[in-house]
Image (cartoon, rainbow, N blue to C red):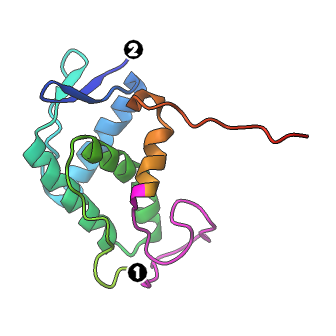
């Protein structure tokens, strides 16, 4: 079973019910965090419509919020959701500002209580999103309509 996220007559995403349920729960969290509606309508009969204007505003506000945060745990918790939102934005032809906010690079994250090794934020200063990261996120999800990454075995 799956659910469709549509913009007009175009399906942007068709995830499993479980992935969709988790995503919609996170939408509620981040709408409250940035103080704007997401433009993602209610899921009815396994379909929802995305309002392009509201969604674009939400995407920009969410990315600005993420760039401003200096809390390592908050940054890490939000990265998967934001990557998913950015893939949706790209599929909706929403122009995204891929550059870090002025002064964002080089600022260290605060309130670090556990060491951050290499990972989503690569353990260096303020994390940011790039086209390559979002492309990677899209390729990891076969339900996005793109083929999954193929792994090749090295000859023995």
Label 1: how many Cα within 10 Å (few below 14, some 14–19, many 20+): some
1 or 2: tag closer to the N-terminus: 2
Q: Position of residue 138 (x, y in %)?
A: 43, 41
Q: Position of residue 50 (x, y in %)?
A: 15, 36
Q: Which residue is mark 1?
A: 105
Label 2: how many Cα within 10 Å (few below 14, some 14–19, many 20+): few
Q: Position of residue 84 (x, y in %)?
A: 36, 45
Relative to 131, is 49 above or below? above
Magenta segment range?
Answer: 105-131
Residue at x-position 37% and y-position 36%: 22
**Label 1: which secondary element:** loop
Is 75 within the magenta? no
Left or right: 95, with 150 as reference point: left
Q: Which residue is mark 2?
A: 1
Question: Which of the numbered marks, if any, corresponds to residue 38?
Answer: none
Relative to 27, is 106 above or below? below
Relative to 136, is 124 above or below? below
Which of the pair 105/131 is nearer the observer? 131
Label 1, label 2: how far apart the Cα atoms are:
42 Å
Residue at x-position 39% and y-position 14%: 1
Total count of labels: 2
Q: Position of residue 81 (x, y in %)?
A: 37, 48
Residue at x-position 36% and y-position 19%: 2
Q: Nearer the viewer, mark 1 or mark 2?
A: 1
Q: Quadrant of residue 36?
A: bottom left
Is 121 within the magenta? yes
Q: Quadrant of the C terminus?
A: top right
Considering every residue shown, the one lying at the far right of the view is 156
């Amino acid at each position: 079973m799956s659910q469709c996220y549509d913009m007009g007559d175009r399906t942007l995403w068709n995830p499993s019910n479980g992935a969709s349920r988790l995503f919609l729960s996170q939408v509620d969290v981040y709408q409250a965090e940035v103080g704007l509606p997401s433009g993602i309508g209610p899921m009815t009969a396994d379909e929802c419509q995305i309002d392009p204007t509201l969604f674009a505003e939400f995407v920009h506000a969410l990315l600005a919020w993420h760039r401003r945060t200096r809390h390592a745990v908050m940054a890490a918790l939000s990265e998967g959701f934001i990557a998913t939102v950015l893939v949706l934005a790209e599929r909706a032809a929403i122009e995204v500002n891929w550059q870090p906010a002025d002064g964002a690079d080089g600022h260290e994250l605060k309130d670090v209580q556990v060491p951050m090794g290499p990972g989503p934020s690569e353990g260096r200063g303020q994390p940011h999103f790039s086209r390559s990261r979002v492309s990677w996120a899209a390729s990891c999800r076969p339900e996005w309509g793109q083929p999954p990454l193929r792994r090749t075995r090295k000859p023995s």
